Amino acid sequence: MLSRMSEHQPSVRRQFVWRHRVRFVDTDASGRIHYTAMLRFFEAAENEYLRALGVDYARLEDRHTSFPRVYVDCNYTGAVRDDDMVDIAVQTERVGSSSFTLAFRASVDTNPAAHGRIVIVCMNVETQKAQALPQNLAAILRGQTAASEAPPTTA
């Protein structure tokens, strides 16, 4: 179910940063980012973060297991406009037995723009109940909690 995970585990924990350019379609009538666009950016950053850890996210879900998001928050703290380059730092904040929490910090030119978190639960599709995270996934994510203050890497 998980592929290439052990061979791609980073030996040093560091902050992961995903960079994305804001497009006109991501903005609202005020010329600033539409609030839903930042959530899409968080999701894209989540996928790239897991990919960088060697997790083939597309293979995590099968007909018996899914990973719904059960909590999402985002606080907007600065302006983000069309054509801005947004850096989104992703960090594993918490790993439980059946869920994990990712924290996000978005910035434009090093100026804080937003921060938030997403809680993802491993769910049995048939019972619609939480189930244990796959052991390999949990181990990789636990290895990333409390990431060091090393300089961010860019994907």
Image: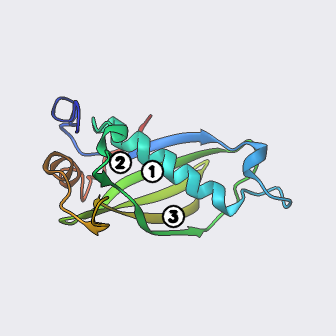
81 or 148, which is in the foreground? 81
For mark 1, what is the residue? Answer: 89
Q: Is residue 54 above or below residue 111?
A: above
**Residue at image coords 15%, 45%:** 136
Q: Amino acid at mark 1?
A: Ala
For mark 3, what is the residue? Answer: 115
Which quadrant of the view contains residue 99? bottom left
**Residue at image coords 61%, 47%:** 109
Question: Disc 1 versus disc 2: distance between alpha carbons?
Answer: 7 Å
81 or 55, which is in the foreground? 55
Which quadrant of the view contains residue 32? bottom right
For disc 2, the neighbor class at 10 Å (few under 14, some 14 to 19, many from 20) is: many
Mark 1 secondary-structure assignment: strand
Q: Is residue 68 left or right of residue 41?
A: left
Question: Disc 2 versus disc 3: distance between alpha carbons?
Answer: 14 Å
Residue 89 visible in the displayed image: yes
Mark 3 secondary-structure assignment: strand
Q: Amino acid at mark 3?
A: His
For mark 2, what is the residue? Answer: 15
Residue 122 at x, y percent in the picture: 28, 59
Question: Disc 3 versus disc 1: distance between alpha carbons?
Answer: 9 Å
For disc 3, the neighbor class at 10 Å (few under 14, some 14 to 19, many from 20) is: many
Q: Amino acid at mark 2?
A: Gln
**Residue at image coords 32%, 36%:** 56
Mark 2 secondary-structure assignment: loop
Residue 116 at x, y percent in the picture: 48, 65
